Structure formats: C-alpha cells, structure tokens
C-alpha cells in the first residue's frame, strides 16, 4: 500500500542477469513527459531530484526492496517522502555487460509512478 503512514510497498525487478549489481532509485518527476529518455541500453523514467534508496545483488535475476525484506526501511522512509505524500517514480538500474542496442554496460527496469497518500 502506497500510504506514507502505513507503507507496505515492495519494489522488485526481475529478468536481470543472474547476479547483477542493482540500484533502486526514485525521482520526484517522470522523464520525457512520461515516455522516458535513452539511458544505457534502456530508458530512464525517473527524473527531477533523484535519490538512491537501496542497492542489491540479484539472486537468480531478481531483486526486491521495501516491505517484507528483512532489514529494509519502508520505501517511503528510504525515499524521504513527506508525511503529506506526493508523486514519485521508481526504477532499478543494473549492470549488464551483454551487448544489445548500445555499447553501454547497464540497463534499467521499467519505471513505476506511485502517488503516495498521507
């Protein structure tokens, strides 16, 4: 649930390389009017003030952050979302040395826009 006072949100990324280094990040705006902008071998959807909220190593190509993950803060706390709520965009950046569309050695997951309630 994306409510700051009772945050039970878990962010996840799947389909990454098996043990890729991954970074969860948040922006307070959406890039490219919500269409994203070219970034590595993919698109960056999060924009504005960017905040790194957690890092992980993928296990079997999957990563997760937030509620239900032992030792993790809530997503809203890690992202410094104010008690009054607000809109944020989340994404996972990950290392991927495979050569796809560009010579970049990283990619991103799809982005998700969340409107936090109080």
Image (tube, rainbow, N blue to C red):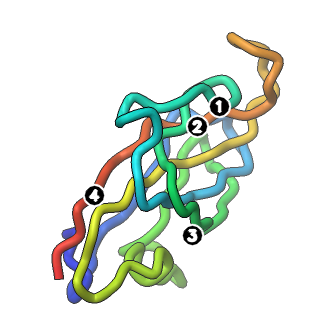
Contact between marks 2 and 1 (CB within 8 A): the answer is yes
Q: Is residue 10 left or right of residue 94?
A: left
Q: CA distance from mark 1 to mark 4?
A: 21 Å
**Residue 61 higher or lower than 43, as above or below:** below
Dot 1 or dot 3, earlier in sequence: 1
Q: Residue at x 30, y 68 (%)?
A: 9
Q: Is residue 31 left or right of residue 98?
A: left
Neighbour class for label 2 at 10 Å: few (<14), some, many (≥20)?
Answer: many
* Residue 11 location (% of width, % of height): 41, 58
Q: Is residue 81 left or right of residue 107?
A: left
* Residue 32 location (% of width, % of height): 45, 33
Q: Which residue is mark 3?
A: 53
Dot 2 or dot 1, earlier in sequence: 1
* Residue 18 location (% of width, % of height): 67, 38
Callout 4 secondary element = strand
Q: Which mark is residue 108?
A: 2
Q: Which residue is mark 1?
A: 39
Contact between marks 2 and 3 (CB within 8 A): the answer is no
Callout 2 secondary element = strand
Callout 3 secondary element = strand
Q: CA distance from mark 1 to mark 3?
A: 19 Å
**Residue 102 higher or lower than 113, as above or below:** above
**Residue 78 higher or lower than 17, as above or below:** below
């Amino acid at each position: 649930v994306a409510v700051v006072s009772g945050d039970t949100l878990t962010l996840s990324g799947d389909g990454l390389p098996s043990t890729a280094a991954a970074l969860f990040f948040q922006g307070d705006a959406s890039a490219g009017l919500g269409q994203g902008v070219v970034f590595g071998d993919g698109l960056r959807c999060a924009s504005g003030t960017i905040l790194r909220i957690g890092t992980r190593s993928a296990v079997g190509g999957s990563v997760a952050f937030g509620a239900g993950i032992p030792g993790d803060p809530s997503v809203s706390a890690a992202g410094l979302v104010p008690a009054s709520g607000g809109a944020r965009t989340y994404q996972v950046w990950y290392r991927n040395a495979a050569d796809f569309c560009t010579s970049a050695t990283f990619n991103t997951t799809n982005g998700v826009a969340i409107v936090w309630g109080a």
